[in-house]
Image: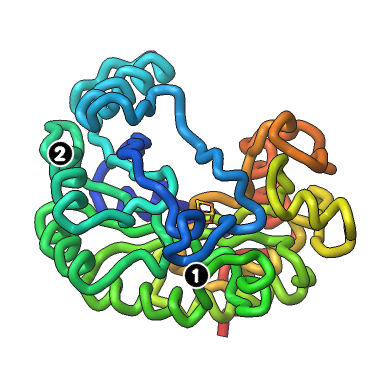
Amino acid sequence: MHYCSYPDYLRNLLGERVQKLSVNAGFTCPNRDGTSGVGGCSFCNGLAFNPSYCNNKTSITQQIDDGIAFHKNRSHKNNSNTKYLAYFQTFSNTYQHIDNLKKIYSEALSHPNIIGIIIATRPDCIDNEKLDYLQQLSESYFVKIEYGIESTYNSTLQKINRGHDFETTATAFEKTAKRNIHSGGHLIFGLPGETPEMMTDEAKVISALPIESLKLHQLQIMRGTRLADEYKSNPDIVHLFSLDEYIDTITKFIEQLRPDIAIERIASEVPQRFLAVPSQWGFVKYDTVLQKFEKHLADTGSFQGKHFN
Ligand code: SF4
């Protein structure tokens, strides 16, 4: 393997193959209600991704049962020993009072098939009290926080109306690691004002964080977003990659990346009907992009950390 893969990372930590199950606990976003900002991030259309089995009108326990049934049907396996991680994915999953968070996370962890939780959130949406509680949980369960980094450049974060700076992100990772809580992050390539060279350079900044895993996404301009309006007025504000150029850019990025950071995703897969600007890639399945990336690494003798300093 030419890069640190996420399934291997999880297997090393947990000693077995586990399945992630998305859970929607009805969280909202502080960058839309005025707490961190108004209007949201310019690339976000506010329609959070939600798998079909995730319905926040039902209990967390029911969503987990439905998710397990969904995955068993899909894989045609009926293995009652499979273990699962509840993935709080939708919006900012620490954006509630600590007492509510305790109820929500505890319900998921009390399910007999759940061995841990993964919590997606914003770096400005966590505090010492919440982290102390998650540290306690992590003594008995697998606990991981997934922070939206999006960019390491403050100029970009301002342009996309992110509502926090990169220093806030770095502090959140430091505080999380000090408590031995697992952590990962998201990064978007192609945001306004960034060149491919700036994006590959981000690997050095990311490598200096106490981060364990990373999801990489190419920018896609969704319908109903502020970015779609900005693009209409000036298509040059963003860098929309061709597939080959994107593979080349993420290859250069991971060459500079710390070798132990697990790569969980290398691209996003948004259906064309949600896009204000059609993807230059056409309809390409995620597995095809991944295979192309792995072949490119093998063909060019490239690997994660090749130029890590
Ligand atoms: S990307 Fe996340 S933080 Fe930004 S507006 Fe959307 S839900 Fe809120």
Query: Where does the image place residue 46, in percent across and percent down from the top left?
Result: 55, 44
Q: Nearer the viewer, residue 35 or 293?
A: 35
Q: Name the residue that disc number 1 marks.
A: 259
The part of the image, by quadrant, that contains residue 123 is: bottom left
Would residue 188 appear left or right of 11 to someone viewing this image? right
The part of the image, by quadrant, that contains residue 234 is: bottom right
Q: Residue at x 25, y 78 (%)?
A: 178
Q: Is residue 151 above or below residue 49?
A: below
Would residue 242 appear left or right of 72 to someone viewing this image? right
- Asked whether the residues under the numbered discs 1 and 2 touch, taking CB atoms below 8 Å apart as contact, a structural biologist would say no
Q: Residue at x 28, y 40 (%)?
A: 86
Query: Where does the image place residue 84, in percent across and percent down from the top left?
Result: 26, 36
In front: mark 1 or mark 2?
Answer: 2
Q: Is mark 2 on a helix, strand or loop?
A: helix
The part of the image, by quadrant, that contains residue 237 is: bottom right
Q: In this view, does 92 lie above or below 88?
A: below
Q: Which residue is drawn at 40% across and 57% down?
A: 121
Would residue 309 appear left or right of 147 to someone viewing this image? right
Q: Nearer the viewer, residue 228 or 186?
A: 228
Q: Which colour scheme is used?
A: rainbow
Amino acid, disc 2: Glu
Q: Can residue 256 be seen in this view?
A: no
Would residue 236 appear left or right of 27 to someone viewing this image? right
Q: Is residue 217 visible?
A: yes
**Distance from Cα at disc 1 to Cα at disc 2:** 36 Å
Query: Where does the image place residue 175, in percent across and percent down from the top left?
Result: 29, 77
If the image is split into quadrants, where does the C terminus sit? bottom right
Q: Name the residue that disc number 2 marks.
A: 107
Q: Residue furthest bottom?
A: 309
Q: What element carries label 1?
A: loop
